[in-house]
Structures are given as C-alpha cells and as structure tokens.
Amino acid sequence: MTWLVGQKLHDGRYAIERELGRGYFSITYLVSDRDRKRLVIKTLSDDLLGQLNSSEIDLIQEQFLQEAVRLAKCKHPHIVQIKEPFLEDNQVCILMEYVDGVDLATRARERLPEAEALRYIQQIGEALKVVHANGLVHRYVKPENILVRNSKDEAVLIDFGLARGADHPLSSLDANTGDGFDAIELYHHVDGKLGDYTDIYSLAGTLYFLLTGVVPPTAMERSQGRERLTAPKQINPEISDRTNEAILTGMALAGEDRPQTIQDWLDILGVQRQVSRSRQSGNSIAWLVVIGALLAVLGSMAAWFIFKPPQSPKPTDNPKSQLIQPRGDFLVNKLPESR
C-alpha cells in the first residue's frame, strides 16, 4: 500500500515521515506517533497485491499477519521488535521499532576487519537461533537487512521478508530476483525444503561480503555452472584459514552439505557462545488478543467478498483504520501454536 508523506494512519496515531524501502513483496515507512517517537510500518506492496485476486489477497494478508505473530515471539536484542499490528484501508500493517543505524551493506563498502565482521555475524547468529527455535526460517538474511545501531556497536536483524513464507508462487525467487545471499532452495522449481541451513547459507554469504567487499555469485548461477564461488581468502589474503573454510562450508550448494544448525556453523567459525539475552514482553497477552481480532476481521472480509450481493459504491465511502473488538474464542481456534 502506497501512502504519502504526512498522511495519518490508524485514526491519526501515526504520521508518515518517509518511505524507507520498497521491494516486490513489501513497503516500509518511517512514521512518528503522537509523542513524536519514531517507528516503522511495514505493509504488502502494491506490485504484489496487483497480481492477486481477492481471495489470494485475503490469504496472503492472513499469512502476513500470522508470520508477524510468530516473529513477535522472537524476543532478542539483535532482532527488531515487532509491535502491535492494525488494519488501514483493509490492508494489514505491521508496526515495528525503528532502529537508528547504518546497514552492513553501507558499512562494508570497504572491507571490515575480520574481528569486527565476526562480532556482527555472531550477534546475528545468536538472533537466528531464537528465530529457528520458534520454528521459523528467516529467508532474508543479507547485509542490507542488518543494521548496526548508532547508539552502540550492536547488529540488529531488521527485515524478515514476511510474505516470503506464503504458500504462493509469488513468494519464491526466480533466476531474475535472487541474489548472492539466497540459498538454492529458495528458488522456483528447486526440489529442496527450507531449514536452518537456508539461513546459514545467507549468513555465510553475508560474512563473505563483509570480508571481501564482493557479492558472491547467485546459487542459481553456481548450480548451472555459469559462475563459481571464489574462496574469500583468494580475494582477501588477510582472512584466516578457519574463517575461509567456515564460509565455504556454510555456502555449500546442497542444504545437506551445510551445517544443520546455526550453532554448528558458529562452532566451525570458532566464535564463542553468547548467553541468551531474550527480551521480556510485558503485554504479550494483549498483543495476541489484537492479533486474534485482526485475523477474525480478515476472515470476515473474505467471506463477505464471496457472498456479498452486487452493490454500487457510494461516493462518500471512505474506509478507516480498523479498531477491532477482540474475540476470545477466535484466539483459541485461529492463533498458531507455540513451538
């Protein structure tokens, strides 16, 4: 959904400051609330929604919201905090914390020292362990989706590619949309299930870039024999042998040839384990009530569309941001189970 600078959302609670990013699947906006606190709103893109019929839109919005439910359970200082969702003009909006910082794609325009790069990779690796423990695969780990906070030297995973887990062909990659950080199993027509090893490929590719300044060739190019993966140490001789081997192992084409857990790969890399510092959430029950109510509204929208009688639109119709009364029974029946 495209909105203009200054436009108010959610009954005036949030004002659009600027667009932060736009991809095929989603758009993110920087917004400010009534107390001038900055936040981020993410919604599905017009490009994606324009190619779907009404029932597909309802389905992908529900999956978008359910993915946010699961991500909200991933409490960790190196994961962007997912806040309360809402509906605006019948479109799901996910509210997130705003991380004031520089992404690693910008920070690593010049090669990073190995110790600094390993510190960020370890932090994101610890974050991914929490993601995987909640039964999720991130699918979107890459330098531009990792911010380093300006306030402290801390990396944060900011973009979960929320729609990419949806069961729809538009949620997968093809040869034209993948990049050097995407594992082969993320592409169309590739017989491979996603797993922790999918994110290991992306994290290893990110480390490759941080230490060499070079984006690795795509997995599709490698699988077709059009490109080969040059060992990072050949590009940057200062890389240690251990790190060089860990990167190559993590970027093996076949998922079964990679380490099967993030911790396995971090052990190969030789970084020390961190004590988990999961965030505490004081309003998780209220948050889930809101989620359940939104899912109920989305389900009602789908049913209304299918069975509605023909009707001419009224000139005064102006859909507002939806404040929804929770339904407790819906929470029991519709919310995804904790893992």
Image (cartoon, rainbow, N blue to C red):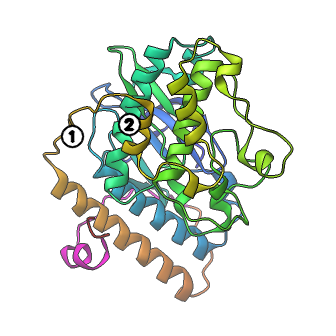
What secondary structure is the magenta-colored segment mainly? loop
Q: Amino acid at mark 2?
A: Asp
- In three-dimensional space, the C-alpha distance between marks 1 and 2, rounded to whole angstroms, equals 21 Å
- Give x and y (percent) for residue 267: 38, 37
Q: In the image, is residue 28 above or below residue 85?
A: above
Element marked by disc 1: loop
Q: Amino acid at mark 1?
A: Ser
Query: Which residue, given by chain and number where applicable, does mark 1 sit on?
Result: 278
Tell me which corner region of the image, top left, top right, bottom left or bottom right, holds residue 222. Answer: top right
Q: Is residue 304 magenta?
A: no
Tell me which corner region of the image, top left, top right, bottom left or bottom right, holds residue 21. Answer: top right
Count the marks. 2
Q: Is residue 311 left or right of residue 187?
A: left
Q: Residue at x 48, y 30 (%)?
A: 146
- Give x and y (percent) for residue 46: 65, 52
- Give x and y (percent) for residue 5: 55, 31
Q: Quadrant of the C terminus?
A: bottom left
Tell me which corner region of the image, top left, top right, bottom left or bottom right, holds residue 296. Answer: bottom left
Q: Nearer the viewer, residue 294 or 109?
A: 109
